[in-house]
C-alpha cells in the first residue's frame, strides 16, 4: 500500500469567529425585520377580508362604511376606518377599495415604508375615491 498524505485528511475547515458573528448579525436583522413587518401584513389581510364582508353587508356607501367599522373593531384593525374607504358604484353593485402606508421605525434615522392597497373590484384596479 502506498503512503497516504494524512495532513490532507486531518485538516479542519469551518466557519471563523468573525464569519459566525457576521452570519448571526444578518440573521438577527432578518428576524427583527420579520417581527416588525408580520403584524402589518396580518392587518392588511384582515382589511382585505373586512372590505369583502362589508361589501356584502351593505347596499349604500354609509352602510358599507358602518359594516367595515364593525369588522375593524372585532378584527383589531387600526390602520384605516370606514371613512377612509373608496366606495364607487359599478354596474351591478359597489366596489370597495383602500390604500394606506405604514412607516415602521427600525433604528436611528432608518425606517421602513410599506404601501398597502386592495380592492373588491374584479379588475383588481383600486377605485378612486369620489369626493
Image (cartoon, rainbow, N blue to C red):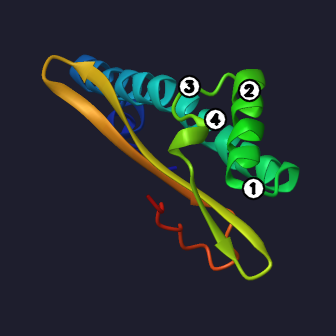
The secondary structure type at the circle numbered 2 is helix
Residue 75 got which mark?
2
Q: Position of residue 56 (x, y in %)?
A: 86, 55
Q: CA distance from mark 2 to mark 3?
A: 9 Å
Q: Residue at x 78, y 47 (%)?
A: 54
Circle 4 residue: 42
The secondary structure type at the circle numbered 3 is loop
Which numbered disc, 4 or 3, marks the residue closer to the eye?
A: 3
Which numbered disc, 2 or 4, marks the residue closer to the eye?
A: 2
Q: Residue at x 48, y 30 (%)?
A: 34
Q: Earlier in the sequence, mark 2 or mark 4?
A: 4
Q: Position of residue 82 (x, y in %)?
A: 61, 39
Q: CA distance from mark 4 to mark 1?
A: 28 Å
Q: Nearer the viewer, residue 11 or 131?
A: 131
**Quarter location, residue 90:** bottom right
Q: Earlier in the sequence, mark 3 or mark 1?
A: 1
- Do we see residue 16 in this rendering? no
Circle 1 residue: 60
Q: CA distance from mark 3 to mark 1?
A: 23 Å
Which numbered disc, 3 or 1, marks the residue closer to the eye?
A: 1
Mark 2 Cα-neighbour bin, 10 Å: few <14, some 14–19, many ≥20: some
Tell whether label 3 touches label 2 (CB within 8 Å): no
Q: Is residue 118 above or below residue 92?
A: above
Tell whether label 1 touches label 3 (CB within 8 Å): no
Q: Nearer the viewer, residue 104 or 99?
A: 99
Tell whether label 4 touches label 2 (CB within 8 Å): no
Circle 3 residue: 78
In this image, 69 relative to 98: left or right? right
Amino acid at each position: 500500500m502506498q503512503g497516504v498524505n494524512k495532513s490532507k485528511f486531518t485538516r479542519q475547515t469551518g466557519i471563523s469567529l468573525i464569519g459566525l458573528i457576521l452570519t448571526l448579525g444578518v440573521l438577527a436583522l432578518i428576524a427583527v425585520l420579520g417581527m416588525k413587518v408580520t403584524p402589518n401584513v396580518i392587518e392588511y389581510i384582515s382589511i382585505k377580508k373586512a372590505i369583502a364582508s362589508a361589501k356584502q353587508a351593505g347596499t349604500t356607501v354609509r352602510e358599507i362604511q358602518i359594516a367595515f367599522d364593525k369588522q375593524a373593531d372585532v378584527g383589531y384593525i387600526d390602520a384605516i376606518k370606514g371613512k377612509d374607504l373608496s366606495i364607487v358604484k359599478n354596474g351591478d353593485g359597489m366596489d370597495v377599495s383602500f390604500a394606506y402606508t405604514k412607516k415602521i421605525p427600525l433604528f436611528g434615522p432608518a425606517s421602513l415604508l410599506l404601501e398597502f392597497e386592495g380592492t373588491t373590484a374584479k379588475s383588481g384596479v383600486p377605485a378612486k375615491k369620489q369626493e
